[in-house]
Amino acid sequence: MNGLAEAAASFALTRWVSRKSRADFDRWQAGALRHFLDSDLPRAPFYGKAPANLADLPVTDKALVMARFKDFNIHGLTAAQAWAALARDGRAGALTVGASTGTSGNRGLFVISEAEKYRWLGTILAKAAPDLVWRGMRVAVILPQNTGLYDSARTSHLIKLAFFDLTKGPESWRGALEAFDPTVVIAPPKILRHFANEGFRLRPKRVFSAAETLDPVDRPVIENFFRLPLDQIYMATEGLFAVTCRQGGLHLAEDSVFFEFEPAGEGLVTPLVTAFRRRTQIMARYRMNDVLRLSKEPCRCGSPLRCVDEIVGRMDDAFRFTSPDGPILVTPDVLRNAVLKADRRIDDFRLFQTGPESIELRLPPTLPDDAAVAAHQAVRALVEIRKAAATITLVRASLPLETGRKLRRVECRLELAR
Ligand SMILES: [Zn+2]
């Protein structure tokens, strides 16, 4: 199949599945998963044979996949070859190599085939903007260069795709983006907010937040500027995991990924994902770093795909303390809410765990002092309730737009201690 046919087939499948009942969907998914376990998974040397059940397979994670990269893809591509390909143009023969952004030593690699690239495109269009496709759409994707997925789409007829490199900074391509006049914009929330702050001349029909956790504090700023509801695409190095529907429900991509959930405390879960439509790099029972809150109610749109209320953040960013009652974990959403609820005027901040017993709260100098003091006290109260031993330092400093790394308002910087 050529690229466009792959994209079209994937588009059709994604739309077809979205109209099933949950019971029919479960049957379809079980069949697709079984086929993957029998036919695709054994081709990766790490597995070698089909398991009786998915649950018989070991749980995997980024450290394991990176340590044995060659054994998780069916072409025997080594991590060294993949890094070399990435340093050139991201091509390794017919394959495309990509990597997650992140601190060096902590980056994840992935490799996909041409067919998978187009399938990904068809899937994302079917979920993100099915109504726009037939009228022709101009999609602006603003993400770090090294994601590797997007080049393929530029040539298609129905869709014009333009890619803007986040790492070069918005001012370098502002004119080109405005001239492109996109109908769909996909960008990290901090960039969408930057467009609002700087008054970029854009009039899209859909706006998607992607690649970073969407903090509730950014949503109203972006929605007021574009006069549109802000939608989300939840994707990571490991693939596409959830997309907002037209009714605002954030649906898990259960039509290409089988999700298991591990409890992460306080009603939150961490997903284990099995990407049953990927055949080049096999991903099974892979532990994501993200923390989710699952919805209890089905979505109004009628899709059988389960919804997520919130992507709370990364488990890595939970703060860790000792207390008389033993070790304590405080998740990013709890920390974030403590700061934001302290005063309505707070619409940006940074909260870092800088040591085993130290936290730094950064607030811009433009914020009135009483609001800063309230936020400082709110974090202190949260820590005291949990009986954690920690001191909180308040720093008044401007919070510049950083394009070279992901924005994490709540960040645990205890890398070495872990
Ligand atoms: Zn929905």
Image (cartoon, rainbow, N blue to C red):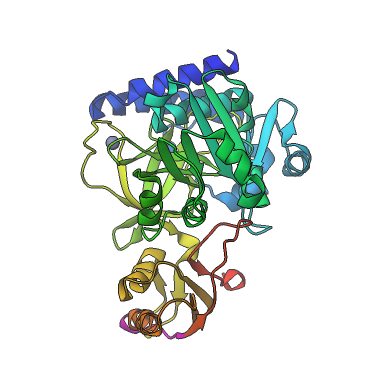
Q: Nearer the viewer, residue 352 or 355?
A: 352
Figure quadrant of the N terminus: top right
Q: Is residue 36 above or below residue 5?
A: below
Residue 173 figure quarter: top right
Asked if residue 109 can be seen in this view, the reply is no
Judged from the image, the quadrant occupied by ligand 1 is top left
Residue 152 figure quarter: top right
Q: Is residue 95 magenta?
A: no
208 left or right, relative to 148: left
Q: Residue at x 65, y 44 (%)?
A: 145
The percent coordinates of residue 119 (x first, y second) are: 52, 25
Q: Nearer the viewer, residue 154 or 212?
A: 154
The percent coordinates of residue 349 (x first, y second) are: 46, 70
The percent coordinates of residue 371 (x first, y second) are: 36, 80
Q: Is residue 388 magenta?
A: yes
Q: Which residues are magenta?
A: 384-392
Q: Is residue 68 above or below residue 375?
A: above
Q: Residue at x 40, y 20 (%)?
A: 13
Figure quadrant of the C terminus: bottom right
